[in-house]
Amino acid sequence: MGCLLVFFTASLRSLALKLGSFSYRDLWMHLLGRLGETADCLTSLFLFMSCAIMLAGSGTVMQDVFSLPLPLGMLPCMFLSFLSCRGGGRGLMGINYALVPIKMLIITGVSLYLLHTTGPPAEPLELNPRGLVSPCWGINALLYVAYNLLFAAVILSTLPPCYGGPKGAAMGAGLMAILAHLLVEVLKSHPEVLSEPLPLLALVGKRAPYLYPVYALALWLAMTTTAAANLYGLVTRLQSLFPFSPEGWALLLLLFIYPLACLGFTSLIVWVYPLFGYIGIFLLILLLW
């Protein structure tokens, strides 16, 4: 699955550069023809819902660590997401340059520590998947790839050429695939936490409570950078339709996303992520066709 993610990510970035695309609509119209309009609408909805999930997740982390109410805990993530939309991609890249290395180092270090201090994988538990989550691990792995490719298509089609080509995109996808594999190995040893809203955070709190604040920070950074990228992609698309300032679009969108995010992280993720994973699989089939 990691190889698929690397291949398609590099291919999408290469195509976006050849087309000189300004938004993901340009990419879909070239690849899918008449179906491009449908893919464009679905992608916009995906970004809106995904941003709501990330805001809710960031609020959940702040709630667990600082006992803040969910609506209040989402505000720092909203502020950084707003800043990411300034400067035609400079805001987004600035936030990622500052936060992503910290996030990656913390998550990798804590995961390796947990692998080192835990025993062999435990016996799998009987889980009852909620929402649209499949009971089959193979389908869920494919959903993960398809969902992330949909997200990657948005970012790779909107960033200017000065921010890198296919090799950089492939490297980023490879690192994400390695990290995902590492996290799966950690969770295989502790399937009892899979029913928690934030399983890895719950596991760190149980096995290494002294690392809990550090890992909570990394998780919050991961959600914040993802929310910022989602908002940036949506703002870029809307700007191509209506000549309004990016800051204005960002503020307007956040005002609509905020009430949805208040529904809570778990309530949103078990339905929205698998749904757009299935949509991503459909788009992949069309691309390969």
Image: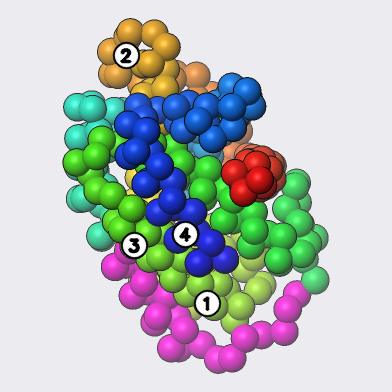
Mark 4 vs 2, N-terminal side: 4
Nearer-the-camera pick, 189 or 163: 163
- Please name the amino acid that badge 2 sits on: Gly
Q: Mark 2 points at which residue?
A: 248
Look at the image and say whether residue 61 sits in the magenta stretch.
Answer: no
Mark 4 vs 3, N-terminal side: 4
Select label 4 or label 3 by which is in front: 4
Task: Give coordinates of residue 6: x percent, y percent.
Answer: 45, 61
Task: Give coordinates of residue 203: x percent, y percent.
Answer: 52, 70
Q: What element carries label 4?
A: helix
How crowded is the residue under tag 2: few (<14 C-alpha within 10 Å), some, or many (20+)?
few
The magenta segment is 104-125
In the rendering, which numbered label is found on residue 7?
A: 4
For residue 72, side relative to residue 139 (left or right): left
How crowded is the residue under tag 3: few (<14 C-alpha within 10 Å), some, or many (20+)?
some
Tell me how far mark 1 sits from mark 4, CA to CA.
26 Å
Tell me how far mark 3 sits from mark 1, CA to CA.
23 Å
- Please name the amino acid that badge 4 sits on: Phe
Mark 3 vs 2, N-terminal side: 3
For residue 265, side relative to residue 158 (left or right): right
Nearer-the-camera pick, 202 or 150: 150
Q: Name the residue under label 3.
A: 171
* Magenta-drawn stretch, dominant element (helix, strand or loop): helix
Q: What element carries label 3?
A: helix
Q: What element carries label 1?
A: helix
Contact between marks 4 and 3 (CB within 8 A): the answer is: no
Mark 2 vs 1, N-terminal side: 1
- Please name the amino acid that badge 1 sits on: Val
Tell me how far mark 4 sits from mark 3, CA to CA.
10 Å
Tell me how far mark 2 sits from mark 1, CA to CA.
42 Å
Q: Name the residue under label 1.
A: 186
- Please name the amino acid that badge 3 sits on: Met
